[in-house]
Amino acid sequence: MTRLLAFAGATIGGYAGWAGGEPFGMFTAFVVSIVLTAVGGYYGRKLGKYYGG
């Protein structure tokens, strides 16, 4: 459960980062996507540990 939620969080974070940074250029989208992928993975894992035990 923890890995699944970490993967889902990273995927959603990466997409949101790309969509949010894309109006400012491709490099900005890439950097923001990387940051939000890490954040999403972190909180997804944290959520998985909380609910999955």
Image (cartoon, helix red, strand yellow):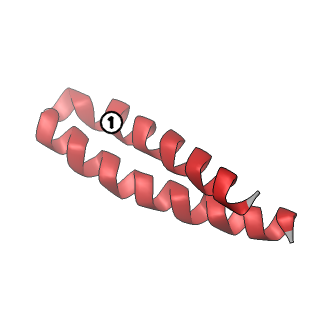
Left or right for 8, reference 33: right
At 64% across and 64% down in the image, what residue appears?
A: 45
At 76% across and 70% down in the image, what residue appears?
A: 49
**For mark 1, does the 10 Å Cα neighbourhood hold few (<14), some (14 to 19), or many (20 or more) residues?**
many
Left or right for 43, reference 2: left
Quarter-wise, where is residue 43 in the image?
A: bottom right
Q: In which quarter of the image is the C terminus?
A: bottom right
Tally the numbered discs. 1
Instruction: Report the residue marked by disc 1.
Output: 18
Left or right for 18, reference 46: left
Residue kind at label 1, given as amino acid type: Trp
Left or right for 45, reference 51: left
Quarter-wise, where is residue 38 in the image?
A: bottom left
Q: What element carries label 1?
A: helix
Quarter-wise, where is residue 29 in the image?
A: top left
Q: In this rendering, is residue 37 above or below 42?
A: above
Please provide percent x and percent y for residue 28: 18, 43
At 57% across and 50% down in the image, what residue appears?
A: 7
Please provide percent x and percent y for residue 42: 55, 65
At 37% across and 42% down in the image, what residue appears?
A: 17
Q: Quadrant of the N terminus?
A: bottom right
